């Protein structure tokens, strides 16, 4: 799980909320059009176009706005930009099980669910060479629960991580070339996008 540094909400969102009056209440149900798209775009940019939970690549058509604190249980947080993230969508048409925001749904326990906006979140997990994500400390209940609730070890995600890991296992490149390759992979590209499974590659391959 990659740490997400929250930015300011888009000005269009602020202006939209400021229109609230006695006859009209701003709420998530009536949020649509350009304002909603501005919000989603802002979330994708601040996340480097990676899913807030699994770090798969985000596109506009495979993602949704995620409420970390679910709006059904925390209505006062539904328009709080600091509570909004962008999660990937489970591709059920391909037979993939639910994961990330779709699987989490309305679950929330602040003592057990780790937020990607927590600056210490990256220290809770480790990654294996065969594509699994695990608690760095096996007794860390929040890390164990977070992996389970978000489905971070479903077969598809394990396979996707393994595929990326295998790219780095070319025996024909020397140590210097390898480290250059790793460092470049962990940098944003010219479009401001991080590459998928950033934390996996950093944990396994980056030599401090």
Image (cartoon, rainbow, N blue to C red):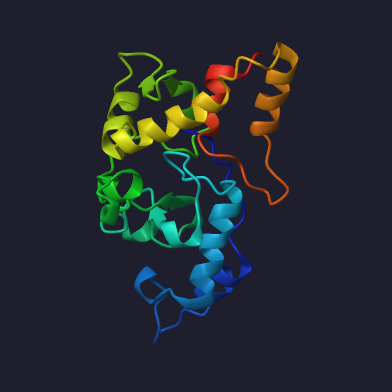
How many marks on residues?
0
- Which residue reaches farthest bottom? 23
Of residue 141 and residue 171, the one placed in the foreground of this image is 171
* Residue 96 pos. (x, y %): 27, 46
| Residue displayed at 49% across by 61% down | 60
* Residue 158 pos. (x, y %): 36, 30
Left/right of residue 22 with respect to residue 204 in the rendered view:
left
Dividing the picture into quarters, in which one does residue 140 lie? top left
Dividing the picture into quarters, in which one does residue 131 lie? top left
In the rendered image, is residue 29 in sight? Answer: yes
Of residue 107 and residue 152, the one placed in the foreground of this image is 152
| Residue displayed at 56% across by 61% down | 41
| Residue displayed at 59% across by 72% down | 12
> 141 above or below 155?
above
Of residue 17 and residue 2, the one placed in the foreground of this image is 2
| Residue displayed at 34% across by 72% down | 29
In the rendered image, is residue 114 in sight? Answer: no
Left/right of residue 159 with respect to residue 121 in the rendered view:
left
* Residue 120 pos. (x, y %): 51, 27
* Residue 115 pos. (x, y %): 42, 38
Q: The C terminus is located in which quarter?
A: top right
> 3 above or below 79?
above
């Amino acid at each position: 799980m990659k740490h997400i540094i929250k930015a300011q909400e888009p000005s269009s969102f602020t202006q939209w909320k400021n229109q609230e009056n006695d006859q009209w209440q701003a709420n998530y149900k009536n949020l649509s059009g350009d304002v909603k798209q501005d919000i989603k775009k802002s979330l994708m940019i601040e996340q480097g176009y990676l899913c807030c939970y699994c770090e798969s690549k985000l596109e506009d058509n495979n993602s949704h706005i995620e409420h970390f604190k679910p709006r059904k249980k925390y209505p006062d947080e539904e328009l709080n930009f600091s509570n909004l993230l962008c999660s990937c969508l489970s591709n059920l048409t391909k037979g993939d099980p639910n994961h990330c925001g779709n699987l989490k749904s309305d679950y929330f326990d602040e003592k057990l669910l780790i937020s990607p906006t927590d600056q210490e979140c990256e220290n809770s997990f480790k990654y294996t060479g065969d594509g699994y994500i695990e608690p760095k400390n096996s007794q860390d209940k929040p890390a164990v629960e977070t992996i389970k609730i978000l489905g971070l070890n479903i077969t598809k995600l394990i396979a996707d991580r393994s595929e990326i890991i295998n790219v780095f296992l070319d025996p024909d490149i020397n140590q210097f070339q390898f480290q250059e390759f790793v460092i470049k992979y962990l940098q944003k590209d010219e479009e401001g996008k991080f590459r998928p499974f950033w934390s996996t590659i950093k944990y396994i391959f980056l030599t401090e």
